[in-house]
Amino acid sequence: MNVSHGSVHPVEDVPTTEGAGPNPLRLRMKDLPGMPGTPGGLVLRLAQFFFSAAALVVMATTSDFPSVTAFCYLVAATGLQCLWSFSLGIVDVYALLVRRSLQNHGVVCLFTLGDGVTSTLTFAAACASAGITVLIDNDLDGCARNHCAQFETATAMAFISWFAALPSFLLNFWSLASR
């Protein structure tokens, strides 16, 4: 069948189901805001990138972050989140400029897997860093000797980055599961 597919070429006129008889054409669900290739998806990717980059920069500028494994893990996880969000942000910009849909099964599967891995890593790193920050601040009373404000800021930025990554993962997973 030599017909252009909607995920490759944009469809200007949406086919109607009027007069199609007992078996109407199955139409693909409209792209929801926040899905890849939509303006909402681009906003989520940019938020993920900026907040994870902020967490990375704030944590990496402290002199004593390498001495704590959880803080090193936060730097690694937010660095991976930055790379993933930036690369998918570029893909979203391209899809918006050329008016392409990113609802190909392979693409959605890749996005779902990547979003799931990076959001899980970011959440785990933020939780570990929050635990260490509470330990230093409340239990050890070591904030006078450490950069507690920077640790708390980086941890908060990582949590906000995770809050922006979670809708991307859930929308992609839902799109993948509804096929």
Image (tube, rainbow, N blue to C red):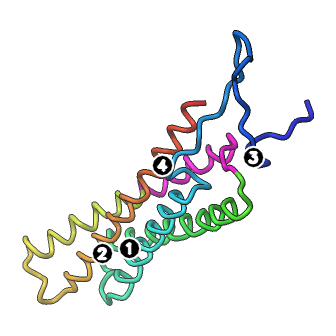
Q: Residues within 10 Å of mark 4 (few under 14, many from 20)?
A: many
Query: Mark 2 or mark 3: which comes first in sequence?
Result: 3
Q: Residues within 10 Å of mark 1 (few under 14, many from 20)?
A: some
Q: Residue furthest front?
A: 19
The reply to whether callout 4 and callout 3 are in contact (CB within 8 Å) is no
Looking at the rendered structure, the kind of residue marked 3 is Glu
Residue 2 against residue 61 in the figure, above or below? above
Element at label 1? helix
For mark 1, what is the residue? 72
For mark 3, what is the residue? 12
Residue 111 on the magenta segment? yes
Disc 2/disc 3 C-alpha distance (Å): 55 Å
The reply to whether callout 2 and callout 3 are in contact (CB within 8 Å) is no
For mark 4, what is the residue? 169
Disc 1/disc 4 C-alpha distance (Å): 25 Å
For mark 2, what is the residue? 68
Instruction: From the viewer's perspective, tell me whether residue 31 is left or right of residue 21.
Output: left
Disc 4/disc 3 C-alpha distance (Å): 28 Å
- Choose mark 2 or mark 3, whichever is in front: 3
Residue 22, horizontal then vertical, whole percent: 70, 9
Element at label 2? loop
Residue 135 against residue 127 in the figure, above or below? below
Instruction: From the viewer's perspective, tell me whether residue 65 is left or right of residue 13.
Output: left
Looking at the rendered structure, the kind of residue marked 1 is Cys
Residue ID at (71%, 38%): 14
Disc 3/disc 1 C-alpha distance (Å): 49 Å
Disc 1/disc 2 C-alpha distance (Å): 7 Å
Residue ID at (70%, 21%): 18
The part of the chain drawn in magenta is 101-120
- Choose mark 3 or mark 1, whichever is in front: 3
Query: Mark 1 or mark 4: which comes first in sequence?
Result: 1
